[in-house]
Amino acid sequence: MRSIAFYILIGFFALLAQNSSRPAGITFALVGDIMLGSDYGDNHCPAKDDVNYFEDAKQFLSAADVAIGNLEGPITTAQNCTKHAANGRVYAFRMPPYLAVALADAGFDVLNTANNHSNDFGRSGRMETEKILDSLKIAHTGRFGDIAVLNVRGSKVAVIGFTINPGNFPLLDDDLATSLVRTLDKLYDIVVVTFHGGAEGAEHLHLPNGPEIFLGENRGDLRKFSHEMIDAGADLVFGHGPHIPRAVEVYHNKLIAYSLGNFCTWYGINVRGVCGLAPMLKVQIDDHGDLLAMDIISFEQQSHHYPKLDPEERAKELIIELSESDIGKFPFDLMRYASGIKKGVNDEFSQTH
């Protein structure tokens, strides 16, 4: 007859096995602006047989559980542009549909459309974009009412995108944004907030306190907004829009990236100097959304207008420098080497260098 101690021991090993089989949270690959080429105005597109944008980035994007970027403009054949020439140049983008397959091939799971170019070709252009992304099984968010929802390794994940432009979830309406995120937090295990805001250009590398005014527009109080989103229940917040990298911050054990700059921007967007530094943020969070580990993979666009790995790691160095100057510290204790991350493996951020 077996003793009580025997059954206690069996129970202990069963519990140990159950705990050891639990995944170590969820891994994210986060990037900034993506504009694959425009066939409108004096912009340019690559040839159909030369769409190799993500040759260097694919290994990292496809290995993450969730890869998210900002789609800077519609993918459409729509003809009626909603914008007018400014100083002889039309700042409007129209990505032809044949380019879209590169996004799926690279491994993107979610694309944000809440930005100042999403409505360049009106509602028809935006809805065609969403239809194309649906066909590629890429979730999307940004248009008011459009929230990306995924099931990731047993967790329900929601992604919501904000910006200042009409027709999108509003970056400038703090009460509404807070209410939306608070509701999502009740419905989903993990909530990711992404935003398109902030002043543009190399002279705006540093994160200010208070609202940012650019070209007469209020581009958001990004510190306040990001903190409010986490206070409301967001687990991860990252931004884009200034076309340059900015600081990162850990706030209540949650990660905020204030701008991930340009990532894959074909002709029509300035990639000189720091505007050509293209960081990818690799993030691992636990089941409660708390930050476990992170890394910054440095790419550059100055040579190709699409992301190439940068052995000098200039994007990482810049973000570290900006975090220390603008936030007061950089979370070195959470840094891990992200090379070779595999989906569903518990040692995603084990050191490989």
Image (cartoon, rainbow, N blue to C red):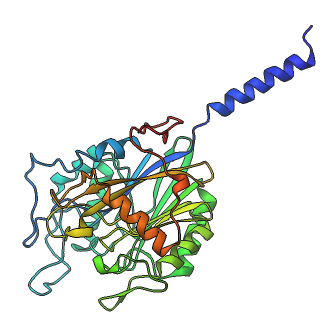
Q: Residue 46 at x, y = what percent?
A: 10, 55
- Answer left or right for 21 relative to 107: right
Q: Position of residue 64 (x, y in %)?
A: 42, 44
**Percent x, y of residue 267:** 14, 65
The furthest residue to the top: 1
Residue 85 figure quarter: bottom left
* Quadrant of the image occupied by residue 116: bottom left
Say if 199 sits above or below 318 in the image.
below
Query: In the displayed structure, does residue 236 sit left or right of residue 212?
Result: right
Any part of residue 111 in sight: no
The residue at 34%/58% (across/down) is 279
Image quarter where the N terminus lies is top right
Residue in the foreground of this view, choosing between 248 and 16: 248
- Decide which of 207, 19 is in the foreground and name it: 207
Quarter of the image where the C terminus is located: top left
* Residue 160 place in picture, x, y as percent: 46, 64
Name the residue rendered at 47%, 77% in the picture. Answer: 222
At x 55%, y 70%, the residue is: 229
Residue 67 versus residue 145 in the image, above or below: above
